Image (spheres, rainbow, N blue to C red):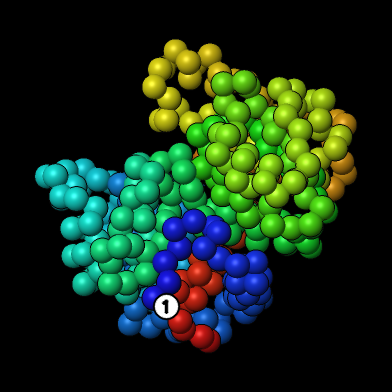
Amino acid sequence: MRHLIEIMDLSTEEIEELIATASGIIAHPEEYREVCRYKKLATLFFEPSTRTRLSFEAAMLDLGGSVLGFSEASSSSAAKGESVSDTVAVVSGYADIIAMRHPKEGAPMVAAMHSAVPIINAGDGGHNHPTQTLTDLLTIKQKKGRFDHLTIGLCGDLKFGRTVHSLIAAMSRYEGVRFVLISPEELKVPSYVKGEYIKSRGIPYTQSTSLEDVMPELDILYMTRVQRERFFSEEEYLRLRDSYILTPDKLKNAKEDLCIMHPLPRVNEISTEVDSDPRACYFEQARYGKFIRMALIMKLLEVRK
Ligand code: CP
């Protein structure tokens, strides 16, 4: 039995295989409508979500399966003090696969140790978000046609942004990749992420506090929201929240084929005026999330069309 706790649980070959399956689903969705008939997905969301939970549910429904679950801890017995391990031990008796989001780093790993069915980490605190990374990789493949020889700018809250940590890990395995890390001093990429995936692999990177200065170099610009829910101080959040706001003016020196990504939700870090720019990929990125999750569910349940 396989779980997906972090993106590095998947080899590059397996990621290619998932992307090929997702591309097949995009092209011929009708061929996949029955592949998970009689299978059930449980979505255990101890933290808010729109895209991840609903795209997981849409994915299972489009594969012909069923869904059950809860969307907030307060409507589960976690509110009465039940542990993650007990919750999962019980729910794995009701469902064939579980997607779980939890505010505590490492909670999905604990869940995997007590589950009789595959566990998918749908985001754990400021740690990892592997299915967002699969979504990001499918978007990069669709838009750029490759993973190698790309200059990737990551901008905003690089400290608490779990999607950033998982994307750096995933992209660090491809040749010719270069990272440009754009953040205020207080929100830099944690040193463990930099050490494990960038420095130890000898990947070229630069750090900048200015988005405008580095814009012309970028093939991909990955914007992120300042993660209010992870700050200890509201004052600190308010001071940093408007550090980067992408506007049409700031894109004047950007490449013609720049791909602007964002895991969403956005607050104000991308002006809505950018939405009509052909380089804005973030809503399409969110749409791809359902297809790659369909491919992942099929892989972990070992079903084929
Ligand atoms: N990108 C993402 O994880 O969005 P949600 O929080 O809405 O699931």
| Residue 158, percent from left and from top | 59, 34
Write the residue at 72% across / 29% down. Answer: 207
223 shown above or below 60: above
Q: Residue at x 60, y 28 (%)?
A: 188
What is the quadrant of the N terminus in the image? bottom left
Residue 193 rendering spot, x and y as whole percentages? 58, 41
Write the residue at 65% across / 58% down.
Answer: 137
Q: Nearer the viewer, residue 274 or 120?
A: 120
> Residue 294: percent from the left, percent from the top?
50, 70
The answer to whether any part of residue 111 appears in the image is: yes
Compare residues 274 and 182 and report the one nearer the observer: 182
Q: Left of 221 or right of it: where is 184?
A: left
Tell me if mark 1 has few (under 14), some (14-19) or many (20+) residues whose alpha carbon lies within 10 angstroms of its own. some
In the displayed structure image, the side of residue 127 where residue 202 appears, left or right? right
Q: Nearer the viewer, residue 134 or 26?
A: 134
Relative horizontal placement of residue 31, taking residue 113 as reference (left or right): right
Is residue 50 visible in this depiction of the protein?
no
| Left or right: where 247 falls relative to 290 | right
Vertical side of 175 occupied by 211: above or below: above
Instruction: Depth check: give the residue in front, 280 or 52.
Output: 52
Residue beneath the point at 18% across and 65% down: 90
Residue identifier under label 1: 301
Q: Quadrant of residue 68?
A: bottom left
Q: How many marks?
A: 1
Q: Residue furthest bottom?
A: 305
Q: Position of residue 251 (x, y in %)?
A: 81, 32
Query: What's the amino acid at mark 1?
Result: Leu
